Image: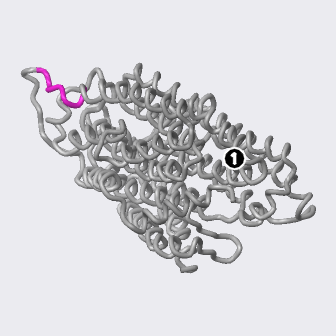
């Protein structure tokens, strides 16, 4: 299985290099093969990792239960986005000109965009597999560089401004995260000496002897720094602009995968801090950031009139839920958090794909201008409505199941008031997310307006359908091996 670990990291890198040089049609095929193969190979690790705990490949790669959950989420979104992008680049522009400028089969735009998309997917995959905190930071920094270029790919004033804002704020945050990494290294010098490797198991083995005050500061800075990329309040300000202005495939990757990968980095520091400081302080920090993020997002979604911007604030909401859930001590809450990572990846991919299809077909993202969507897009319209209901936490979708587990864990571990706040704010977010969006989807077109029923691309609709099916499966019955993996990953997060 060590060869599989190495193989997962290769397709995205190779596809990124190849896609730049080959014709557009070949670049699409290479991208689809890279994304799907990465996801299939990551699924092949579920059973052995659930049994053994981890699989290592040399000193660089180590996939344990916790990392594998985030690897599956990242490769799943990467695979779906690869298929969606193949259809999106080929589909004709809508009334508004479409989101891709010059993205036709004969343009160099398509291969360059796909090269960046593959490198973006590769960097997130590497981040979930590397066995070193410093290299984890480098991988997440690479995601910033590549994704910022992708955000600005449409070459509009809005996308350029969003990309610059993203680069400045995310780079500042990652600078803080780098300082946290240096501080943590310093905390370990008293145990391991002046020269040692920042591998996870080494740090965990000596964490109980680290200097508490140094670890305390390093942990807070790590949450603040990586929380910038995760979209936690108040360091979230890049996220709504970047997610709404980026090409739709990039929005799906940012929201469905990158935010989760940044959360994964925080959890690695959380593991170490718990062993040094005990459970109290690390959980309180996550709870504070989580409640603030959820409250801000729940109120913000009420005022959104742009569909993609609405989905961006929904992402902040779900990151707040993840932080709150991780602050609960009960294992069932941690299982719910990890299930939420997977369910959010599926739901948010479906929703952004739907928004992109509407933009391609109708030429607008403004909710006030959208009418007759279900009639005009017979597949995309209903699936987008279901995706939004799934994001809102309604059964039988995976997010309902995960949030139920989180609340159950909060109540069983004595976190009554945080669990109550979570429920209230989720209800507020539900009202804001569903009211204006579903109204726009379901309201028929004005009388006398001709409606042509057509989908921009079969591949785009198929990507949505696969993600929606997965979201439903995660809500109805989590497969046995995956359930064992989630339980084992939750156990890894608890300090011995």
Relative placement, left or right, of 271 versus 348 is: right
Identify the residue under disc 1: 279
Residue at the spot 50% in from the left edge and 45% down from the top edge: 409
Residue 193, compared with residue 279, is above or below; it is below
- Report helix, strand or loop for mark 1: loop
Relative placement, left or right, of 354 versus 309 is: left
Image location of residue 231, percent across then percent down: 57, 37
Residue 206, compared with residue 57, is above or below; it is above
Camera-nearest residue between 23 and 345: 345
Quarter of the figure with the C terminus: bottom right
Residue 327, compared with residue 122, is above or below; it is above
Image location of residue 357, percent across then percent down: 29, 41
Residue at the spot 32% in from the left edge and 41% down from the top edge: 390
Write the start and end of the magenta stretch as one range.
Answer: 440-446
Residue at the spot 32% in from the left edge and 47% down from the top edge: 397
Camera-nearest residue between 248 and 51: 51
Residue at the spot 62% in from the left edge and 56% down from the top edge: 493
Give the residue furthest to the left. Answer: 448
- How was this image coloured? one colour
The answer to which image quadrant residue 290 occupies is top right
Relative placement, left or right, of 350 versus 12 is: left
Camera-nearest residue between 13 and 232: 232
Residue 134, compared with residue 373, is above or below; it is below
Q: Is residue 442 magenta?
A: yes
Q: Is residue 146 magenta?
A: no
Q: Is residue 164 visible?
A: no
Image location of residue 340, percent across then percent down: 45, 48
């Amino acid at each position: 299985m060590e060869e599989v670990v190495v193989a997962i990291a290769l397709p995205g890198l190779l596809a990124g290099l190849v896609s730049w040089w080959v014709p557009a049609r070949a670049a699409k095929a290479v991208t689809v093969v890279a994304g799907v193969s990465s996801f299939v190979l990551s699924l092949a690790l579920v059973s052995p990792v659930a049994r053994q705990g981890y699989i290592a490949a040399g000193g660089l790669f180590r996939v344990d239960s916790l990392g594998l959950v985030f690897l599956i989420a990242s490769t799943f979104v990467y695979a779906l986005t690869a298929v969606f992008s193949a259809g999106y680049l080929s589909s004709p522009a809508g009334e508004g000109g479409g989101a891709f400028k010059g993205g036709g089969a004969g343009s160099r735009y398509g291969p360059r965009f796909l090269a960046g998309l593959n490198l973006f997917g590769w960097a997130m995959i590497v981040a979930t597999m590397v066995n070193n905190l410093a290299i984890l930071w480098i991988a997440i920094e690479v995601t910033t560089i590549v994704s910022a270029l992708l955000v600005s790919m449409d070459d509009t004033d809005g996308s350029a401004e969003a990309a610059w804002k993203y680069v400045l704020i995310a780079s500042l945050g990652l600078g803080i995260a780098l300082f946290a990494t240096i501080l943590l290294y310093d905390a370990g010098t008293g145990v391991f000496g002046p020269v040692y490797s920042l591998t996870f198991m080494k740090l965990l083995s000596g964490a109980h002897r680290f200097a508490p005050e140094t670890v305390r500061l390093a942990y807070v800075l790590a949450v603040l720094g990586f929380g910038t990329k995760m979209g936690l309040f108040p360091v979230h300000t890049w996220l709504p602009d970047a997610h709404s202005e980026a090409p739709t495939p990039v929005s799906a990757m940012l929201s469905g995968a990158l935010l989760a990968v940044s959360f994964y980095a925080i959890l690695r520091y959380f593991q170490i801090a718990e062993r040094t400081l005990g459970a109290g302080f690390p959980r309180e920090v996550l709870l504070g950031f989580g409640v603030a993020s959820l409250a801000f997002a729940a109120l913000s979604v009420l005022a959104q009139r742009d569909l993609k911007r609405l989905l961006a604030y929904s992402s902040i909401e779900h990151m707040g839920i993840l932080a709150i859930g991780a602050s609960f001590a009960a294992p069932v809450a941690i299982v719910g958090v990890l299930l939420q990572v997977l369910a959010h990846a599926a739901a948010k991919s479906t929703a952004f794909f739907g928004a992109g299809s509407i933009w391609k077909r109708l030429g607008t993202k403004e909710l006030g201008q959208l009418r007759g969507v279900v009639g005009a897009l017979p597949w995309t319209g209903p699936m987008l409505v279901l995706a939004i209901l799934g994001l809102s936490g309604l059964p039988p979708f995976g997010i309902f199941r995960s949030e139920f587990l989180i609340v159950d864990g909060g109540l069983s571990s004595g976190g009554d008031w945080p669990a109550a706040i979570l429920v209230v704010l989720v209800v507020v977010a539900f009202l804001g997310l569903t009211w204006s969006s579903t109204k726009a989807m379901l309201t028929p077109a004005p009388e006398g307006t001709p409606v042509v029923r057509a989908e921009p691309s079969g591949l785009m609709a198929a990507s949505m359908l696969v993600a929606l099916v997965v979201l439903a499966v995660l809500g109805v019955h989590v497969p046995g091996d995956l359930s064992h993996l989630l339980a084992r990953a939750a156990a890894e997060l608890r300090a011995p």
